[in-house]
């Protein structure tokens, strides 16, 4: 039988990676994600691949987030020469995300090596370079949703809309091996059905084995309208307090949803702030990709009195300012109140949000909104967990701003949505939970047994099973 090996995003959220091997010798890597969070987890990005990259026939990606494709340039640098399959929109977003990651890898190594030189330590090489990334991007092969394609001898895939971000996909894989066909379905990251821009995840019914994400396996999200009301209340409170609003941004997906909602508030007369700054060059470029693939987004309600404005962001949210350059970013610091600042990165592990923390996090009149998952070991998670002060940019900053967590904006399905998606499969295929912290997996495992009488398995890192 064919084999699958669990190499990443196993009892953790980041670093998605699974190796599929047929008895006929075909090898396909499903995902090639970067690990993010604790320093020791990030160090795992430098560990040797547990397979020969040159022996792979294909790489198949579910979507363009860094924790699903972020090690691709390193894979190519170490010998992988085959195709990299993704949807057409994911191919465009991958270029944006990987080029940014490569630039940061080189700059971080340059910065770190200045300190290492002063300590007499040997220099570090970047995890990968811009040149590695350009080579990896040259190996992309775009596939549309719904089209069956052979990616390796005897291995066929079909992409279905996962509703997570633009271009995200559920991967349906058929493995033809010694006259036996086995069907593997990988959920990828399933979207929250309340997203204003994404379609609901596609429903599939046939599989022999399912890999299902479990990021929010322990809880449901609040209804979106309740979350929107809470966001509106926070904005009003910040206006009354005389401070700014900081929103760490996931450049692809979350930022576009937030701009949609802020535009809706503006059109309804519910946005008290006089300026919204999108201080993320990557998010700004992502906006243009979303516009280019507008036909793949969910049909927005044409009955809204302001629906005709949605396609043009300058009509939709006229107070939005996109700050590309460092000088434009620094100029935002002149705003002591009345500004909403959306800046990368989403988990506060780097980027321009750190500089805005330096100027605002210690001010009790300011408000900080987390609108996405914060992985263990990240600065964002420390703040969410109640840190009184944090270290950033080589200094300690007090956390005096009011901190809010809006789980209803998550781009991931909640527990009930995960169960609703998987219950459509016939004949109870084998079910493995991936892409989640262990306690979230255990909660989802219990809920699946209680609601569907379906026993899901939580694999161990490095475990190999027959399909």
Image (spheres, helix red, strand yellow):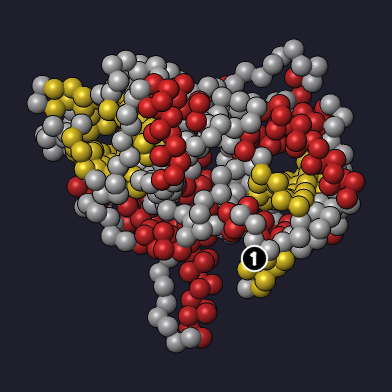
Question: 378 above or below 152?
Answer: below
Please state which of residues 214 and 272 is positioned toward the viewer in this rendering: 214
Q: Where on the picture, by quarter, is residue 305?
A: top right
Q: Secondary structure at mark 1?
A: strand
Q: State the residue at coordinates (82%, 27%).
A: 267
Quadrant in the picture for the N terminus: top left
- Does residue 168 appear left or right of residue 278 in this picture? left
**Residue that carries the numbered disc 1 in the rendered image:** 390
State the image coordinates of residue 460 (x, y, percent, origin top left): 29, 46
- Does residue 230 appear left or right of residue 79 in this picture? right
Q: How many callouts does the rendering have?
A: 1
Q: Where on the picture, by quarter, is residue 327?
A: bottom right
How would you rate the neighbour count of disc 1 (Cα within 10 Å): few for under 14, some for 14-19, many for 20 or more?
Answer: some
State the image coordinates of residue 46 (x, y, percent, origin top left): 36, 62
Q: Residue furthest left?
A: 178
State the image coordinates of residue 119 (x, y, percent, origin top left): 48, 86
């Amino acid at each position: 039988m064919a084999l699958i090996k669990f190499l990443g995003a196993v009892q953790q959220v980041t670093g998605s990676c699974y190796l599929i091997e047929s008895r006929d010798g075909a090898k396909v890597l499903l995902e090639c994600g970067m690990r993010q969070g604790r320093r020791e987890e990030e160090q795992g990005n430098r560990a040797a691949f547990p397979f020969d990259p040159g022996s792979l026939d294909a790489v198949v990606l579910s979507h363009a987030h860094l924790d699903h494709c972020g090690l691709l340039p390193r894979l190519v640098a170490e010998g992988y020469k085959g195709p990299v399959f993704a949807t057409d929109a994911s191919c465009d977003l991958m270029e944006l995300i990987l080029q940014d990651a490569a630039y940061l890898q080189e700059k971080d190594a340059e910065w770190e090596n200045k300190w290492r030189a002063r300590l007499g330590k040997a220099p570090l090489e970047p995890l990968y370079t811009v040149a590695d990334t350009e080579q990896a991007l040259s190996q992309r092969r775009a596939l549309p949703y719904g089209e069956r394609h052979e990616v390796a001898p005897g291995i066929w895939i079909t992409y279905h809309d996962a509703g997570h971000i633009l271009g995200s996909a559920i991967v349906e894989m058929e493995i033809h091996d010694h006259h036996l066909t086995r069907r593997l379905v990988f959920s990828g990251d399933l979207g929250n059905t309340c997203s204003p821009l994404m379609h609901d995840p596609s429903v599939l019914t046939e599989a022999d084995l399912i890999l299902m994400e479990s990021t929010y396996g322990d809880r449901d999200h609040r209804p979106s309208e309740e979350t929107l009301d809470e966001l509106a209340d926070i904005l009003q409170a910040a206006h009354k307090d005389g401070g700014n609003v900081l929103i760490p941004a996931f450049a692809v997906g979350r930022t576009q949803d937030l701009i949609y909602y802020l535009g809706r508030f503006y059109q309804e007369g519910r946005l008290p702030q006089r300026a919204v700054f999108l201080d993320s060059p990557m998010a700004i470029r992502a906006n243009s990709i979303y516009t280019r693939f507008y036909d793949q987004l969910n049909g927005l309600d044409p009955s809204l009195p302001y629906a005709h404005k949605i396609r043009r962001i300058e009509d939709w949210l006229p107070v939005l300012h996109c700050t590309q350059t460092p000088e434009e970013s620094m100029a935002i610091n002149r705003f002591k109140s009345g500004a909403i600042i959306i800046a990368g990165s989403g988990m506060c592990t780097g980027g321009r949000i750190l500089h805005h923390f330096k100027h605002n996090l210690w001010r009790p009149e300011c408000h900080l909104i987390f609108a996405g998952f914060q992985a263990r070991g990240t600065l964002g998670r420390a703040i969410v967990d109640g840190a009184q002060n944090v270290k950033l940019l080589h200094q300690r900053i007090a956390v005096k701003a009011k901190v809010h967590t809006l789980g209803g904006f998550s781009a991931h399905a909640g527990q009930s949505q995960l169960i609703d998606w998987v219950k459509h499969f016939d004949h109870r295929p084998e079910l493995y939970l991936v892409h989640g912290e262990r306690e979230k997996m255990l909660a989802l495992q219990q809920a699946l047994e209680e609601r569907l009488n379906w026993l899901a398995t939580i694999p161990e890192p490095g475990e190999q099973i027959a399909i």
